[in-house]
Image (spheres, grey):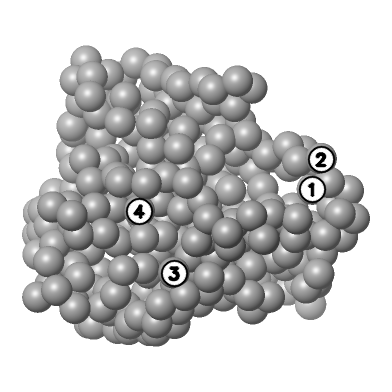
């Protein structure tokens, strides 16, 4: 504990982009300490685009990063997996404009991390510790980041739909909790939005294999993986966008009906005001470690239970 990590060995997968429909290969490659999470466009001589707030380009329906005119879309699901599982340093090589959507969840990325293994580096891990609250609101949507000695998120969605309604997810963000509670939750969209989104040039790679499609009173392609899969997916997206802080957070984040735009705005506000945070190598407080242990015990099936 307390040291930076990377992965043991390179691993890869491939698929199509949700919005562009373009086929791409993704490869995770071990990286040295203090690299952070660095995307590289493998088709453009490994042009680097850091997973950092300073490179956020577009935030409608997915988070896209851009540096010097080079774009990479839909970064949030792979980032959610890397950030939650505590991978500090890794190259994420993608040979096209968009990260493959795979099954619409973060589970395929978690499985890749299982294949890759984790390696501890000799450099101490640095945390971005929030000292003062910061929030952003837009109409009835809002998001706030508050001081805490651990990384915790609370995410609330509210859609007028018989299968959704109000769904609330709250968790301590770590590898076991992410795997158990969020990784499998898939992207979703409303059937009535499909044509307008297509007309905007979006979801060209969208299909019943990579997104839950909600009709007016049900889902087109059930069964759901969780009754509250929508709220869980929003929390997954939120964590993926918070990864753009560039370092592991010690903070409590609360989001109400937020989306990529608000997620990335609050990260920008936070980073822009140097009085709101500090960098520390001090580990999350013991309360969190106790909770972590309890959580991992709870996740491990008890042998006597059957
Ligand atoms: Zn998503």
Chain-order first, disc 3 or disc 1: 3
Taking the spot 48% from the left edge, 65% from the top edge, the residue there is 19
| Residue 160 position by quadrant | top right
Q: Position of residue 246 (x, y in %)?
A: 24, 45
Q: Closer to the camera: disc 1 or disc 2?
A: 2
Residue at the spot 30% in from the left edge and 26% down from the top edge: 270
Q: Are marks 1 and 2 in contact (CB under 8 Å)?
A: yes
Cα distance, mark 3 to mark 1?
Answer: 27 Å
Q: Which residue is mark 3?
A: 20
Residue corresponding to mark 2 = 160
Please say if 57 is above or below 284: below
User: Are discs 2 and 3 less than 8 Å apart at CB?
Assistant: no
Residue identified by numbered label 4: 64
- Label placed on residue 164: 1
From this view, report whether residue 184 is shown above or below residue 83. Answer: below
Secondary structure type for disc 1: loop
Would residue 207 appear left or right of 175 to someone viewing this image?
A: right
Q: Earlier in the sequence, mark 2 or mark 4?
A: 4
Q: Nearer the viewer, mark 1 or mark 4?
A: 4
Percent coordinates x, y for residue 283 in the rendering: 27, 40
Look at discs 3 and 4 and give the one toward the viewer: 3
3 or 4: tag closer to the N-terminus: 3
Crowdedness near tag 1: few (<14), some (14–19) or many (≥20) residues, C-alpha within 10 Å = some
Q: Earlier in the sequence, mark 2 or mark 3?
A: 3
Of the image marks 1 and 4, the number of the one nearer the N terminus: 4
Q: Secondary structure at mark 3?
A: loop
| Separation of residues labelled 1 and 2 (CA atoms) | 7 Å
Image quadrant for the C terminus? bottom right
Would you say the beta carbon of the disc 2 residue lies within 8 angstroms of ligand 1? no
């Amino acid at each position: 504990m307390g040291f930076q990590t990377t992965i043991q060995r390179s691993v890869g997968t491939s698929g199509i982009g949700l919005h562009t429909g373009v086929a791409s290969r993704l490869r995770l490659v071990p990286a040295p300490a203090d690299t952070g999470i660095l995307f590289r466009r493998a088709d453009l001589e490994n042009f680097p685009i850091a997973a950092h707030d300073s490179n956020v380009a577009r935030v409608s329906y997915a988070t896209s990063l851009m540096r010097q005119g080079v774009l990479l879309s839909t970064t949030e699901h792979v980032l959610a997996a890397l950030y939650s599982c505590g991978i500090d340093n890794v190259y994420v090589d993608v040979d096209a404009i968009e990260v493959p959507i795979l099954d619409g969840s973060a589970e395929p990325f978690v499985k890749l991390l299982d294949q890759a293994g984790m390696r501890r580096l000799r450099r101490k891990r640095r945390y971005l510790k929030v000292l003062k609250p910061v929030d952003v609101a837009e109409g009835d949507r809002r998001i706030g980041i508050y001081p805490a000695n651990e990384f915790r998120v609370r995410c609330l969605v509210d859609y007028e739909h018989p299968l959704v309604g109000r769904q609330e997810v709250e968790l301590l963000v770590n590898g076991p909790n992410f795997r158990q509670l969020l990784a499998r939750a898939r992207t979703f969209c409303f059937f009535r939005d499909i044509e307008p989104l297509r007309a905007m040039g979006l979801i060209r790679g969208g299909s019943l294999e990579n997104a839950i499609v909600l009709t007016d009173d049900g889902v087109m392609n059930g069964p759901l993986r969780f009754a509250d899969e929508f709220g869980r997916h929003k929390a997954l997206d939120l964590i993926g966008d918070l990864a753009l802080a560039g370092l592991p957070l010690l903070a409590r984040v609360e989001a109400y009906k937020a989306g990529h735009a608000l997620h990335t705005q609050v990260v920008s506000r936070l980073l822009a005001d140097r009085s709101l945070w500090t960098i520390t190598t001090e580990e999350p407080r013991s309360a969190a470690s106790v909770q972590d242990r309890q959580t991992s015990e709870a996740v491990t099936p008890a042998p006597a239970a059957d």
